[in-house]
Amino acid sequence: MSTVSRTDAKVRKGASFSRQVAAFVGATNEKANVVVRKTALGLLANVVEASPVDTGRFRGNWQVGIGARPSGTTEASDKDGSSVVTAAASQLEDSKLGDTVYVTNNLPYARRLEFGHSAQAPRGMVRVTVARLREILEGAVEDAKQGGGGGGT
């Protein structure tokens, strides 16, 4: 084999390695993005589930924002929280590693409920969910490892 042929083979092999590295980086980034989406959705789902419910207006006012905190309130009522979680899953489809994801409820009485005003949620919703963050994150990582998509929890 001539020197030129050996060099040519090494270049081709290097190009193949570069493609492999690029493919690995792409797959790793997508898995990280899945973890971001699943963690954010898991946090929201847990907050919604922990929320006290009377008319469903409080649960219906949980909102997700990517890059900016949602403002205002909605007229939505969602006693079981499924509509809020479904809407958030759709919003989070484009979220990725590095994005700031906000979970908020802008109803005037949200702060009082978080700090024990309701017998249904005496320890709040956000605080008890944040206490479970590691568990939610580990579940999202495991799901991403197993090839789970960007959807539900």
Image: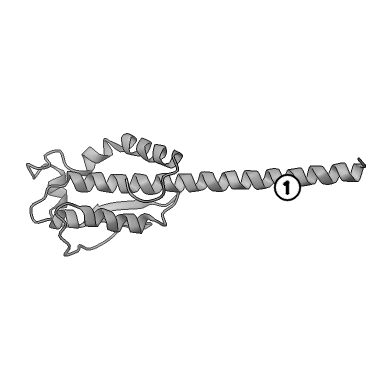
Residue 31 on image: x %, y %? 47, 45
**Which residue is label 1 attached to?**
15
- Report the front residue among 129 and 5: 5
Tell me if I can see residue 122 in this picture: yes
Left-right relation of 17 to 56: right
Q: How many marks?
A: 1
Secondary element at image label 1? helix
> In this orientation, which residue lies closer to the viewer: 51 or 23?
23
Residue at 41% from the left image edge and 38% from the top image edge: 141
- Work out whether residue 39 or residue 98 is closer to the camera in this orientation and state it: 39
Relative to 40, 107 lies left or right? left
Specify whether residue 108 is in view: no
Name the kind of residue labelled 1 in the image: Ala
Please state the horizontal and vertical placement of residue 14, each as a whole percent of the image.
74, 44
Left or right: residue 84 compared with residue 109: right
- Position of the C terminus, as image quadrant, is top left
Crowding at label 1, few (<14), some or many (≥20) Cα neighbours within 10 Å? Answer: few
Would you say 21 lies left or right of 33 here? right
Give the residue displayed 28% in from the left and 56% down from the top.
86
Seen in the picture, residue 91 relative to 26 is either above or below; the reply is: below
Residue 24 appears at what percent x and percent y? 58, 43
Q: Which residue is painted at 8% across and 44% down in the image?
A: 118
